[in-house]
Amino acid sequence: MRLGLLFTLVVALAGAFGLALACGGSGTGTPTATSVPATLPADRTGTPTATSVPATLPADRTGIAEVDAVVEAVLSHNVEAFRALMRFTAGPCTTASQSEGGQPPCKSGETEGTPVEFVPGTVAVGQLSRCEASYYRPDEIDGILEASALSDASLFAVYRTPGSEPPRQYTAVFSFGFRDKVWGSLLVIEDGRVVNVNLGCGFRAPDGRPVELVYP
Protein backbone atom coordinates (compact mmCIF):
# COMPACT_ATOMS: atom_id res chain seq x y z
CA MET A 1 0.00 0.00 0.00
CA ARG A 2 1.13 3.52 -0.66
CA LEU A 3 -0.84 5.30 2.03
CA GLY A 4 -0.32 9.02 2.24
CA LEU A 5 0.05 9.54 -1.49
CA LEU A 6 -2.35 12.23 -2.61
CA PHE A 7 -3.01 12.70 -6.27
CA THR A 8 -5.76 13.46 -8.75
CA LEU A 9 -7.21 10.10 -9.82
CA VAL A 10 -7.92 11.00 -13.41
CA VAL A 11 -4.29 11.90 -14.19
CA ALA A 12 -2.70 9.20 -12.07
CA LEU A 13 -4.91 6.38 -13.31
CA ALA A 14 -4.46 7.41 -16.92
CA GLY A 15 -0.71 6.98 -16.56
CA ALA A 16 -0.93 3.96 -14.33
CA PHE A 17 -3.30 2.12 -16.63
CA GLY A 18 -0.82 2.11 -19.49
CA LEU A 19 1.58 0.32 -17.18
CA ALA A 20 -1.17 -2.05 -16.03
CA LEU A 21 -1.86 -3.06 -19.63
CA ALA A 22 1.80 -3.60 -20.33
CA CYS A 23 2.09 -5.81 -17.29
CA GLY A 24 -0.98 -7.85 -18.15
CA GLY A 25 -3.49 -6.54 -15.56
CA SER A 26 -3.84 -7.21 -11.89
CA GLY A 27 -3.63 -10.98 -11.92
CA THR A 28 -5.47 -13.53 -9.85
CA GLY A 29 -2.69 -15.43 -8.16
CA THR A 30 -3.48 -18.04 -5.53
CA PRO A 31 -1.63 -17.64 -2.23
CA THR A 32 0.76 -20.41 -1.35
CA ALA A 33 2.71 -21.15 1.81
CA THR A 34 6.49 -21.13 1.65
CA SER A 35 8.57 -23.51 3.79
CA VAL A 36 11.86 -22.39 5.29
CA PRO A 37 14.31 -24.26 7.54
CA ALA A 38 13.63 -23.66 11.21
CA THR A 39 16.48 -22.76 13.54
CA LEU A 40 16.93 -24.52 16.86
CA PRO A 41 17.17 -22.72 20.19
CA ALA A 42 20.66 -22.69 21.70
CA ASP A 43 19.67 -25.20 24.41
CA ARG A 44 18.07 -27.75 22.04
CA THR A 45 19.45 -30.49 19.83
CA GLY A 46 17.93 -32.54 17.08
CA THR A 47 16.79 -32.21 13.48
CA PRO A 48 15.30 -28.89 12.38
CA THR A 49 11.78 -29.05 10.95
CA ALA A 50 10.19 -26.87 8.30
CA THR A 51 8.22 -23.86 9.46
CA SER A 52 5.31 -22.59 7.38
CA VAL A 53 5.41 -18.90 6.49
CA PRO A 54 2.03 -17.12 6.05
CA ALA A 55 0.97 -16.80 2.43
CA THR A 56 1.20 -13.42 0.73
CA LEU A 57 -1.88 -11.60 -0.52
CA PRO A 58 -3.13 -12.36 -4.03
CA ALA A 59 -2.29 -9.69 -6.59
CA ASP A 60 -5.88 -8.42 -6.66
CA ARG A 61 -6.39 -7.92 -2.92
CA THR A 62 -5.68 -4.86 -0.79
CA GLY A 63 -5.30 -6.30 2.70
CA ILE A 64 -8.24 -4.14 3.84
CA ALA A 65 -10.90 -6.63 4.93
CA GLU A 66 -13.94 -4.47 4.20
CA VAL A 67 -12.70 -3.75 0.68
CA ASP A 68 -11.47 -7.25 -0.10
CA ALA A 69 -14.86 -8.76 0.80
CA VAL A 70 -16.45 -6.68 -1.96
CA VAL A 71 -13.66 -7.40 -4.43
CA GLU A 72 -13.91 -11.14 -3.75
CA ALA A 73 -17.69 -11.12 -4.28
CA VAL A 74 -17.32 -9.30 -7.59
CA LEU A 75 -14.45 -11.32 -9.02
CA SER A 76 -16.03 -14.65 -7.96
CA HIS A 77 -19.48 -13.52 -9.20
CA ASN A 78 -21.00 -14.44 -5.84
CA VAL A 79 -24.42 -12.79 -6.04
CA GLU A 80 -25.54 -13.63 -2.51
CA ALA A 81 -22.32 -12.38 -0.95
CA PHE A 82 -22.50 -9.22 -3.05
CA ARG A 83 -26.13 -8.59 -2.10
CA ALA A 84 -25.25 -8.98 1.59
CA LEU A 85 -22.61 -6.26 1.17
CA MET A 86 -25.01 -3.69 -0.27
CA ARG A 87 -26.37 -0.84 1.85
CA PHE A 88 -29.84 -0.05 0.56
CA THR A 89 -31.38 3.38 0.89
CA ALA A 90 -35.10 3.75 1.58
CA GLY A 91 -37.10 6.35 -0.31
CA PRO A 92 -40.24 6.99 -2.34
CA CYS A 93 -40.41 5.99 -5.98
CA THR A 94 -41.72 8.26 -8.70
CA THR A 95 -43.81 7.69 -11.81
CA ALA A 96 -42.18 10.65 -13.59
CA SER A 97 -40.48 9.75 -16.86
CA GLN A 98 -37.31 11.55 -15.81
CA SER A 99 -36.51 10.99 -12.15
CA GLU A 100 -35.31 14.10 -10.35
CA GLY A 101 -33.91 14.58 -6.91
CA GLY A 102 -32.57 11.03 -6.58
CA GLN A 103 -35.91 9.23 -6.69
CA PRO A 104 -36.02 5.76 -8.23
CA PRO A 105 -38.69 5.07 -10.85
CA CYS A 106 -41.74 3.13 -9.72
CA LYS A 107 -42.17 -0.37 -11.06
CA SER A 108 -45.34 -1.92 -12.37
CA GLY A 109 -47.90 -2.05 -9.58
CA GLU A 110 -46.23 0.73 -7.57
CA THR A 111 -47.85 4.12 -7.23
CA GLU A 112 -46.23 7.52 -6.82
CA GLY A 113 -44.50 7.76 -3.44
CA THR A 114 -44.39 4.02 -2.71
CA PRO A 115 -41.49 3.39 -0.27
CA VAL A 116 -38.78 1.25 -1.90
CA GLU A 117 -35.20 0.21 -1.17
CA PHE A 118 -32.39 0.87 -3.62
CA VAL A 119 -28.68 1.54 -4.09
CA PRO A 120 -28.08 4.66 -6.22
CA GLY A 121 -25.58 4.86 -9.02
CA THR A 122 -24.99 5.47 -12.70
CA VAL A 123 -24.92 3.19 -15.72
CA ALA A 124 -23.51 3.61 -19.21
CA VAL A 125 -26.11 3.17 -21.93
CA GLY A 126 -26.26 3.46 -25.72
CA GLN A 127 -23.12 1.38 -26.35
CA LEU A 128 -21.41 3.25 -23.49
CA SER A 129 -22.07 6.57 -25.24
CA ARG A 130 -23.69 8.26 -22.23
CA CYS A 131 -24.41 7.74 -18.55
CA GLU A 132 -27.72 7.84 -16.73
CA ALA A 133 -28.79 7.71 -13.10
CA SER A 134 -29.67 4.22 -11.94
CA TYR A 135 -31.35 2.80 -8.85
CA TYR A 136 -30.68 -0.85 -8.07
CA ARG A 137 -33.36 -2.72 -6.13
CA PRO A 138 -32.56 -5.81 -3.99
CA ASP A 139 -33.92 -8.15 -6.68
CA GLU A 140 -31.70 -6.54 -9.33
CA ILE A 141 -28.32 -7.13 -7.70
CA ASP A 142 -27.56 -10.18 -9.85
CA GLY A 143 -27.87 -7.92 -12.90
CA ILE A 144 -24.98 -5.79 -11.62
CA LEU A 145 -22.58 -8.72 -11.61
CA GLU A 146 -23.92 -10.03 -14.91
CA ALA A 147 -23.34 -6.70 -16.65
CA SER A 148 -20.24 -6.75 -18.83
CA ALA A 149 -18.97 -3.73 -16.89
CA LEU A 150 -18.25 -6.09 -13.97
CA SER A 151 -18.64 -9.67 -15.25
CA ASP A 152 -15.46 -9.42 -17.32
CA ALA A 153 -13.70 -6.83 -15.18
CA SER A 154 -10.41 -6.84 -13.29
CA LEU A 155 -9.52 -4.86 -10.19
CA PHE A 156 -7.61 -1.81 -11.38
CA ALA A 157 -7.22 0.40 -8.31
CA VAL A 158 -8.66 1.26 -4.90
CA TYR A 159 -8.54 4.75 -3.48
CA ARG A 160 -9.62 6.26 -0.19
CA THR A 161 -11.71 9.39 -0.10
CA PRO A 162 -10.42 12.00 2.35
CA GLY A 163 -12.72 14.10 4.47
CA SER A 164 -13.44 12.05 7.59
CA GLU A 165 -11.37 10.81 10.50
CA PRO A 166 -10.64 8.01 10.21
CA PRO A 167 -11.46 7.76 6.48
CA ARG A 168 -14.11 5.09 6.04
CA GLN A 169 -14.95 5.48 2.38
CA TYR A 170 -13.13 3.59 -0.35
CA THR A 171 -13.75 3.33 -4.08
CA ALA A 172 -12.86 0.13 -5.92
CA VAL A 173 -12.10 0.74 -9.59
CA PHE A 174 -12.63 -2.13 -12.03
CA SER A 175 -11.50 -2.06 -15.66
CA PHE A 176 -13.02 -3.89 -18.62
CA GLY A 177 -12.64 -3.91 -22.38
CA PHE A 178 -15.27 -2.90 -24.91
CA ARG A 179 -14.77 -2.24 -28.62
CA ASP A 180 -10.98 -2.15 -28.32
CA LYS A 181 -11.10 0.43 -25.53
CA VAL A 182 -10.70 0.23 -21.78
CA TRP A 183 -13.53 1.45 -19.57
CA GLY A 184 -13.97 1.81 -15.83
CA SER A 185 -16.61 0.90 -13.26
CA LEU A 186 -16.64 2.13 -9.66
CA LEU A 187 -18.03 0.70 -6.44
CA VAL A 188 -18.11 3.12 -3.50
CA ILE A 189 -17.62 1.26 -0.21
CA GLU A 190 -18.51 2.87 3.09
CA ASP A 191 -17.93 1.06 6.38
CA GLY A 192 -17.76 -2.24 4.50
CA ARG A 193 -20.95 -1.76 2.47
CA VAL A 194 -21.44 -0.77 -1.18
CA VAL A 195 -23.34 2.53 -1.22
CA ASN A 196 -23.01 3.56 -4.87
CA VAL A 197 -22.58 1.63 -8.12
CA ASN A 198 -21.08 3.11 -11.29
CA LEU A 199 -21.24 0.72 -14.25
CA GLY A 200 -19.05 1.73 -17.16
CA CYS A 201 -19.00 5.48 -16.55
CA GLY A 202 -15.26 5.89 -16.21
CA PHE A 203 -12.35 6.12 -13.79
CA ARG A 204 -12.95 9.70 -12.69
CA ALA A 205 -12.92 10.52 -8.98
CA PRO A 206 -15.95 12.45 -7.69
CA ASP A 207 -15.57 16.15 -8.52
CA GLY A 208 -11.93 15.60 -9.43
CA ARG A 209 -10.95 15.71 -5.76
CA PRO A 210 -7.50 14.45 -4.74
CA VAL A 211 -7.62 10.95 -3.32
CA GLU A 212 -5.33 8.53 -1.53
CA LEU A 213 -4.33 5.43 -3.48
CA VAL A 214 -4.32 2.20 -1.44
CA TYR A 215 -4.09 -0.30 -4.32
CA PRO A 216 -1.97 -1.14 -6.23
Image (cartoon, helix red, strand yellow):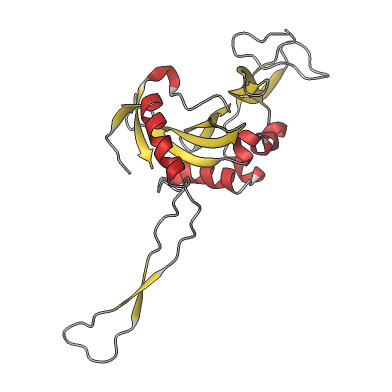
> With 178 as the anchor, is 94 left or right in this view?
right
Q: How many marks?
A: 0
Say if residue 164 shows up in the picture. no
In the image, taking residue 126 as reference, residue 89 lies left or right, namely left
The image quarter in which residue 1 lies: top left
When asked about the image quadrant of residue 90, the answer is top right
Q: Nearer the viewer, residue 23 or 2?
A: 23
Frontmost residue, 20 versus 109:
20
**Which residue in the rendered view is the most extreme toward the left?**
42
Give the image location of residue 156, x and y in percent.
Answer: 46, 39
Rendering coords of residue 96 (x, y %): 72, 7
Residue depicted at x 46% and y 35%: 191
Residue at (58%, 43%) from the top-left corner?
A: 74
**Any part of residue 41 in sight:** yes
**Residue 37 x, y percent position in the rendering:** 30, 79
Looking at this view, name the residue that lies furthest to the right. Answer: 109
Q: Quadrant of residue 150?
A: top right
Residue name at image x 59 percent, y 9 percent: 101
Apparent side of residue 180 relative to residue 34 in the rendered image (left or right): right
Q: Is residue 28 above or below residue 205?
A: below
129 lies left or right of 10 = right
Image x and y of residue 187, in percent: 52, 32
Furthest-bottom residue in view?
A: 46
Which quadrant does the C terminus fall into?
A: top left
